[in-house]
Image (spheres, helix red, strand yellow):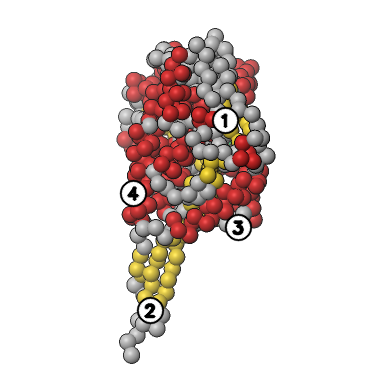
């Protein structure tokens, strides 16, 4: 049975007439994916969650020149739909809309903003299944994991709905009798939020949640690879009663959109998650108008397993830290550094666990490893594995494309990896676990810190003193005997070239607030 859903069905809002004539309707799904797909796609359409236009000032909009880009299902290569290929003009309009909305949204009471965010959270959770399906469809991760992302992502909105009410200031004891000194916290203004494809929902909510809670308005630029989840989340923000212009979404020409956000003096803050190279460009670009900036960039996470670790705990923790999202997260274990006394046992037990990981389409029952995001990602993995094996690393498992074809890659374990191999120097961003060997704690620490990155690190040991010592390594997040540590209630962020600022937790609010000092003079009674 072929699945055909008309493009108009996905557009509950009327198109502007001058835009609607510019390009003929195209089938939403280019061909059948599976019987399951029919069910979830129709639910997405009827819930109004399969959006394929940008959102500017509360209006759904095409690109002004009618250009579009295709969104693919990475598991099949099918075109899911097209979205507008926007650029400078649409971004400038989105900035103006956000700027105009800021004057009222920043004045709404914290209680009212909190209610809107809470409503948004409730809608995200009540559409958990559909949003999960959308994430699997455009990003590829297994459905269970995708629904986990919805819970995690929505959690930021819930958490910051509560934090909205706790933006306290201070009163400073004045050194002069006729003065009173106050500290106020005020929203920074319009925020440009640029997000990647690996967490199509959560990377947005952990920026937009605190921004809106503080009274800021946002222009979101999701990844062009996964814009549909962002648009569905924006639709739910509209349904939650978040006023027009407070949340805007543009996508298309990344550098044109980025340049417009950077150039505008109305944009007071850029928040970005993505590659270190793009992060550096944005940081340099933000200097022109002296914007606040937060960056969540690449990692090169060490996962250190000591001789005294509990083997089962270390295997389970390393498996989660390495293979979550098919290895495509910036906190994924990139170097598994194992002490010589437990090395062979660990490699053996770990490989047996990796061998059991079921690879397949995200909608299939029991699958825990989906495809990589695109062909370029597979080629990068292949080149890293080739470099390692050519320099002496041994293939314990995998190290080739999966028989499913497309962008599926076999879960891989490499042993005898050395610190100078590419795979130990840079993020592989795929399902490859390189295992290195060390002798002493000092050596492990030296190896762990020998990188420009400093996002996540993991330690497996039963020695309490050692866990404290090693947790002081140059990283922003450390998991001790635990491989999955991200949560909305704790601060997430890196040191060194892994970034600036923190997301999540009470600290995540500071990124969107200015600290203002008010001095009241001439206070003596007369
Ligand atoms: P990744 O390699 O993980 O896709 P990128 O840094 O390339 O990481 O992408 C993260 C986000 O940054 C995406 O939304 C992408 O479109 C956007 N992006 C890429 N280049 C630029 C740029 N020059 N200006 C602004 N955003 C950009």
Residue 485 quadrant: top left
Q: Give the number of the mark in front: 3 or 4.
A: 4
Q: Residue furthest bottom?
A: 526
> Sequence-wise, which precedes: disc 3 or disc 4?
4
Residue 342 quadrant: top left
Mark 1 vs 4: CB contact within 8 A: no
> Sequence-wise, which precedes: disc 3 or disc 2?
2
Q: Position of residue 94 (x, y in %)?
A: 57, 48
Q: Nearer the viewer, residue 299 or 516?
A: 516
Q: Give the number of the mark in front: 3 or 2.
A: 3
| Residue denoted by label 2 | 179
Real-space CA distance between mark 1 and mark 2, rounded to the nearest whole angstrom: 56 Å
| Residue denoted by label 3 | 265
Q: Nearer the viewer, residue 57 or 189?
A: 57
Q: Secondary structure at mark 1?
A: loop
Real-space CA distance between mark 2 and mark 4, rounded to the nearest whole angstrom: 37 Å
The answer to whether the beta carbon of the residue marked 4 is less than 8 Å from any atom of ligand 1 is no
Q: Position of residue 413 (x, y in %)?
A: 50, 17
The answer to whether the beta carbon of the residue marked 1 is less than 8 Å from any atom of ligand 1 is yes
> Sequence-wise, which precedes: disc 2 or disc 4?
4
Q: Position of residue 362 (x, y in %)?
A: 46, 19
Real-space CA distance between mark 3 and mark 2, rounded to the nearest whole angstrom: 34 Å
| Residue denoted by label 1 | 225
Mark 3 vs 1: CB contact within 8 A: no
Q: Position of residue 358 (x, y in %)?
A: 43, 14
């Amino acid at each position: 049975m072929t699945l055909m859903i008309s493009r108009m069905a996905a557009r509950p809002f009327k198109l502007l007439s001058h835009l609607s004539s510019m390009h003929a309707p195209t089938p939403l799904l280019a061909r059948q994916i599976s019987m399951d797909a029919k069910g979830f796609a129709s639910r997405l359409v009827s819930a109004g969650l399969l959006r394929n236009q940008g959102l500017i000032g509360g209006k759904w909009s095409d690109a002004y020149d009618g250009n579009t880009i295709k969104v693919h299902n990475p598991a099949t290569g099918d075109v899911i739909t097209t979205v507008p290929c926007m650029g400078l003009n649409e971004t400038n309009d989105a900035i103006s809309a956000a700027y105009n909305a800021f004057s009222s949204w920043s004045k709404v009471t914290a209680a009212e903003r909190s209610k809107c965010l809470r409503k948004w959270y409730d809608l995200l959770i009540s559409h958990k299944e559909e949003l999960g399906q959308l994430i699997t469809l455009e990003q590829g991760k297994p459905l269970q994991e995708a629904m986990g992302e919805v819970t995690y992502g929505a959690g930021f909105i819930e958490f910051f709905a509560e934090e909205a009410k706790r933006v306290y200031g201070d009163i400073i004891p004045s050194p002069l009798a006729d003065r009173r000194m106050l500290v106020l916290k005020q929203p920074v203004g319009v925020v440009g939020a640029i997000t990647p494809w690996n967490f199509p929902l959560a990377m947005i909510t952990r920026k937009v949640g605190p921004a809106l809670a503080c009274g800021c308005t946002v222009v979101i630029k999701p990844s062009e690879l996964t814009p549909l989840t962002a648009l569905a989340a924006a639709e739910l923000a509209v349904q939650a009663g978040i006023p027009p212009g407070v949340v805007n979404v543009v996508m298309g020409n990344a550098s044109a959109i980025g340049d417009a956000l950077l150039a505008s003096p109305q944009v007071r803050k850029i928040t970005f998650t993505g590659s270190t190279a793009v992060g550096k460009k944005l940081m340099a670009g933000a200097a022109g108008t002296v914007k606040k900036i937060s960056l969540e960039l690449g990692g090169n996470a060490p996962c250190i397993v000591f001789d005294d670790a509990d083997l089962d705990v270390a295997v389970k923790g390393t498996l989660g830290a390495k293979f979550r999202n098919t290895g495509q997260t910036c906190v994924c274990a990139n170097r598994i550094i194992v002490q010589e006394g437990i090395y062979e046992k660990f490699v053996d037990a770990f490989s047996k666990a990796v061998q059991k990981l079921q690879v397949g389409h995200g909608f299939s029952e029991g699958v825990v490893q989906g495809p990589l995001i695109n062909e370029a990602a597979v080629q990068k993995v292949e080149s890293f594995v080739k470099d390692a094996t050519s320099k002496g690393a041994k293939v314990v498992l995998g190290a080739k494309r999966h028989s499913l074809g497309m962008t599926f890659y076999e879960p891989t374990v490499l042993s005898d990896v050395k610190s100078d191999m590419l795979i130990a120097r840079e993020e592989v961003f795929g399902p490859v676990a390189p295992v290195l060997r060390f002798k002493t704690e000092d050596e492990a620490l030296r190896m762990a810190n020998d990188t420009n990155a400093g996002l996540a690190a993991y330690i497996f040991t039963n020695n309490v003193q050692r866990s404290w010592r090693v947790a002081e390594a140059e990283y922003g997040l450390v998991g001790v005997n635990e491989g999955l540590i991200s949560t909305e209630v704790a601060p997430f962020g890196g040191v060194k070239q892994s970034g600036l600022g923190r997301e999540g937790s009470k600290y995540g609010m500071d990124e969107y607030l200015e600290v203002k000092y008010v001095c009241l003079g001439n206070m003596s009674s007369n």
